[in-house]
């Protein structure tokens, strides 16, 4: 039986929805993100790095610092932001960017708010990108980062919350599935916060039926883009977990909070994985009306409310003993 998303614990009146729709009209003028070659992602990545010059000033304004650490010989690294006081927990953050762009620093605004509000350390994964690394290597970097964090003396005994957005939500879910081989490490994870992830690398129905007017994402080209990321595989192989987390075994998983936008071609990914996940652990899932992919980045009241609720949820999960709401069924 399909799962119905929960009622949003924030205002969704006509004023808030009108604001979202007005912003969508601006998005409609922007080009859609496409993965058709390696040149464009490299150009976008270069522009991103230029835009981040001097970005440490944001941290200093809050009395915070970031530390970058290499965690293996392959090139995987993490960016650590610690709270000013003693950390109550740790957030393991996976950035988005379609596996081909992005870095840990791009989430600083979100992570500063999490550090200050929740009194946790944030460890963001700087995984290698799929323009030069097979997606299996990208996933290996994320698992290596999780194992590194969960075995560090600095974070010993602290509850861990996994957070991922878009491709990062895919990597977060895939990492949790990989940790099933180490139950002791998986038990340290108290929650998973996932924003509009990709969980079926062959495309869920909403991906396959995405119209040309999809905002931000190239709707008609999404299935082909997923194939380009996995050129040596057929669809049956693409559906195998952890590459497609939707088909994994969620027993022993932590509680989760999930969000998707009503206009996002990836909405079925979130709704479908929530339905499967909740057989093993509590799941809150929200489908945001009139909202496209990437909506938490937009200047709307609904986005601000979603992020505030997310921080409240992180704080609650940090305080909650993992044994209370977990199931090993």
Image (cartoon, grey):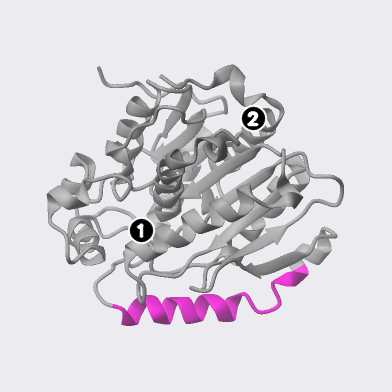
Q: Is residue 210 visible?
A: no
SS assignment for the magenta stretch, majority: helix
Reading the image, the residue beneath label 2 is 317
Q: What element does badge 2 sit on?
A: helix
Residue drawn at the location 82% of the way across and 66% of the way down: 60
Q: Residues within 10 Å of mark 1 (few under 14, many from 20)?
A: many
Residue drawn at the location 31% of the way across and 78% of the way down: 38
Reading the image, the residue beneath label 1 is 216
**Which portion, as a residue range, is magenta?**
38-57
Q: Judge left or right: residue 98 versus residue 314.
A: left
Q: Judge left or right: residue 148 versus residue 166.
A: right
Residue 262: give its label.
Answer: none
Residue closest to the eye, 301 or 250? 250
Residue closest to the eye, 15 or 321? 321
Q: How many marks?
A: 2
Residue 178 versus residue 217 in the image, above or below: above
Q: For residue 156, what is the image quadrant?
A: top right
Determine if the magenta segment contains residue 54.
yes
Residue 144 versus residue 47 in the image, above or below: above
Q: Residues within 10 Å of mark 2 (few under 14, many from 20)?
A: many
Residue drawn at the location 39% of the way across and 24% of the way down: 5
Residue 227 location (% of width, % of height): 19, 61
Determine if the magenta segment contains residue 305.
no
Residue drawn at the location 38% of the way across and 68% of the way down: 100
Classify the position of the C terminus by image quarter: top left
Residue closest to the eye, 171 or 291? 171
Residue 8 versus residue 32 in the image, above or below: above
Residue 103 location (% of width, % of height): 53, 67
Residue 207 location (% of width, % of height): 22, 47
């Amino acid at each position: 039986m399909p799962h119905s998303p929960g009622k949003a614990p924030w205002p969704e009146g006509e004023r808030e929805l009108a604001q979202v729709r007005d912003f969508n009209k601006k998005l409609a003028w922007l080009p859609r993100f496409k993965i058709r070659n390696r040149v464009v992602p490299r150009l976008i990545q270069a522009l991103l790095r230029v835009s981040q010059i001097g970005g440490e000033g944001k941290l200093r304004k809050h009395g915070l610092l970031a530390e970058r650490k290499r965690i293996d010989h392959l090139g995987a690294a993490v960016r650590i932001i610690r709270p000013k006081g003693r950390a109550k927990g740790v957030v393991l953050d996976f950035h988005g960017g379609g596996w081909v762009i992005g870095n840990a620093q791009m989430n600083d605004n979100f992570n500063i708010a999490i550090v200050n509000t929740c009194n946790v350390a944030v460890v963001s994964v700087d995984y290698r990108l799929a323009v030069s690394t097979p997606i299996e290597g990208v996933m290996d970097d994320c698992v290596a980062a999780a194992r590194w964090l969960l075995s560090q003396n600095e974070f010993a005994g602290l509850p861990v919350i996994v957070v991922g957005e878009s491709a990062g939500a895919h990597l977060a879910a895939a990492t949790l599935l990989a940790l099933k081989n180490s139950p002791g490490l998986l038990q340290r994870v108290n929650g998973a916060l996932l924003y509009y992830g990709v969980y079926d690398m062959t495309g869920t129905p909403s991906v396959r039926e995405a119209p040309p007017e999809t905002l931000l994402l190239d709707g008609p080209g999404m299935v082909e883009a997923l194939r380009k990321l996995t050129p040596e595989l057929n669809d049956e192989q693409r559906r195998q977990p952890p590459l497609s987390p939707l088909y994994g075994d969620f027993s022993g998983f932590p509680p989760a909070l999930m969000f998707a936008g009503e206009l996002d071609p990836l909405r079925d990914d979130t709704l479908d994985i929530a339905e499967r996940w909740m057989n093993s652990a509590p799941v809150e899932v929200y489908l945001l009306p009139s909202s496209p992919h990437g909506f938490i980045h937009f200047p709307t009241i609904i986005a601000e409310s979603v992020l505030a609720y997310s921080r409240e949820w992180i704080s609650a999960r940090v305080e909650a003993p993992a044994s209370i709401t977990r199931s090993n069924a």
